[in-house]
Image (tube, rainbow, N blue to C red):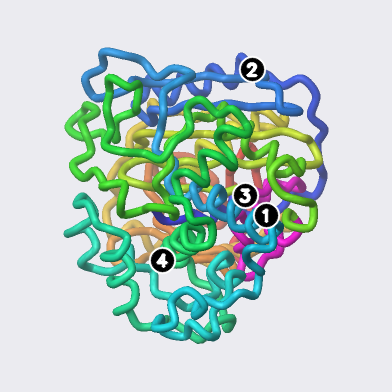
Amino acid sequence: MRTILMFITLIFSFALQGQSDFDSKKLDAYLDLLEKNNKANLTVAISKGNELIYEKHAGFLSSKLEKRIDSNTKFRIGSISKTFTAVVIFQLIEEGKLAIDTKLSEFYPDFKNGDKITIAELLNHSSGIHNFTADPDFPSYAAHRKSKEELLAIMQLMPSDFEPKSKTSYSNSGYILLGLIIEKVSGKTYTQNVEERIIKKLSLPNTAYGDKIELEKNEAESMIFQGGKWIQYPLEWDMSIPFSAGALVSTPGDLNQFMHALFNNKLVSEVSIKKMQEVKGNLGHGIFPVPFYARSAFGHNGHIDSFDSGSYYFKDDDVNFTVLTSGITIGYNDILVGVLSIYFNMPYELPDYSASPIELAADKLPAYEGDFASNIFPLDIIVKVSGSTLTAQATGQNAFPLTPYSNIEFRFDAAGIVLLFGGTEDAVDYSSFVLKQGGQQYPFRKK
């Protein structure tokens, strides 16, 4: 149920390319390629002006391979649920039942720092409340039902990570508390609030508070690829655990409709939307910004069990994208880059999955080391050996491992990055490489 703050491209593009009719056949081919090569079980929907203009599904409902994913297949959406929770909170604020600066201590006076933590800090993850799902003992009870009182007791025993407002750190705990506050203020359950205020209002037929996965109800099974085949993921969270931080299930069509309604003032006012988009530490109040070249979207993503999800609205283009997966063997970010690149007519080569990684002798790796720069890319990249692995690190970024596919080609699949050194297989030019990502190419030379 973590958030994945995706840096979709390493940099913003210097020129915004226009988008007219996109190549839907290329997008079909890309998603077919993912399924054929066991890279993902997924469903994708794109809506323009709240009208569905593209939808495709790749893969099967479960590891039994008996039924394919379809438009009504429900996926666990994890932390996208937080956006629903935030919407209900802002609705209650607009009704005068809460204020953005209402203190946590008004509801839970014994909670540590409760007199310093407001609704705003819970929404934008600056409360300092420790994230209970990050605790080492969390997996031991993730699959077991817990009452709301038990969840509250667990969180109250945790120390604060920092003083409220001093910084941000993603916390599922804060959104559990927001769900509990919704129930106290409204006198109704969290589920009733979401159903009455959002689901029924927008007529979202496939969105609900989740329960144990049932294939008979067209609910996608959580899967991993192991031993050459898809198998059921061994741990299924009990949905009492994520509660208002991540317990909803939905479909791409429903989520596109929800996001469009949200950003077009159908659920909350323009004032509330602006507050939701106020960012601290790259986190807004229930949503966050996602850059894609010169464009920028707002939305949320999620991860629970083996499900990865994301739903984003590009306001300037009035277009929604939702990609839901029930099992992937590559980075979710890589898939999203492919979908967005093809839709926005950015240069994008379909990935080649025919190649296999190779092993390079440890004594060969030091030859690739160096500090590289590009005259069209603003960051330097340092390539060095770490243990028995070659790594790359862009200025100000974390280092990432490079997997060799030949003497000159190295990949970091989680971000769709390829480093292609110069020369040939038999005569490598260690002084230069081309960085490929998202259909773009950037030449680098060793300083």
Question: What secondary structure is marked by label 4?
Answer: helix
Q: Residues within 10 Å of mark 1 (few under 14, many from 20)?
A: some
Mark 4 or mark 1, which is nearer to you? 4
Q: Amino acid at mark 1?
A: Ile
Residue extent of the magenta highlight: 274-298
Q: Residues within 10 Å of mark 2 (few under 14, many from 20)?
A: some
**Contact check, label 2 and label 1, Cβ < 8 Å:** no
Q: Residues within 10 Å of mark 4 (few under 14, many from 20)?
A: many
Please name the residue that numbered disc 3 is placed on: 9
**Contact check, label 4 and label 1, Cβ < 8 Å:** no
Q: Residues within 10 Å of mark 3 (few under 14, many from 20)?
A: some
Residue at horizontal 56 percent and vertical 63 percent from the top: 394
334 vs 243, nearest the viewer: 243
Residue at horizontal 63 percent and vertical 66 percent from the top: 98
290, above or below 396, in the image? above
Q: Measure how far apart labels 3 and 2 are at the Cα level.
A: 22 Å
Of pointers 3 and 2, the one earlier in the residue sequence? 3
Residue 409 showing in the rendered view? no
**Contact check, label 1 and label 3, Cβ < 8 Å:** yes
Q: Amino acid at mark 3?
A: Thr
Question: What secondary structure is marked by label 1?
Answer: loop
79, above or below 387, in the image? above
Question: What secondary structure is marked by label 2?
Answer: helix
Q: Amino acid at mark 4?
A: Ser
Which of the labelled discs sits on residue 11, or is there none? 1
Mark 2 or mark 4, which is nearer to you? 4
Of pointers 2 and 1, the one earlier in the residue sequence? 1
Which of the labelled discs sits on residue 173, or is there none? 4
**Contact check, label 2 and label 4, Cβ < 8 Å:** no
Q: Amino acid at mark 2?
A: Ser
Which of the labelled discs sits on residue 24, or is there none? 2
In the displayed orientation, state which residue is furthest to the front.
Answer: 187
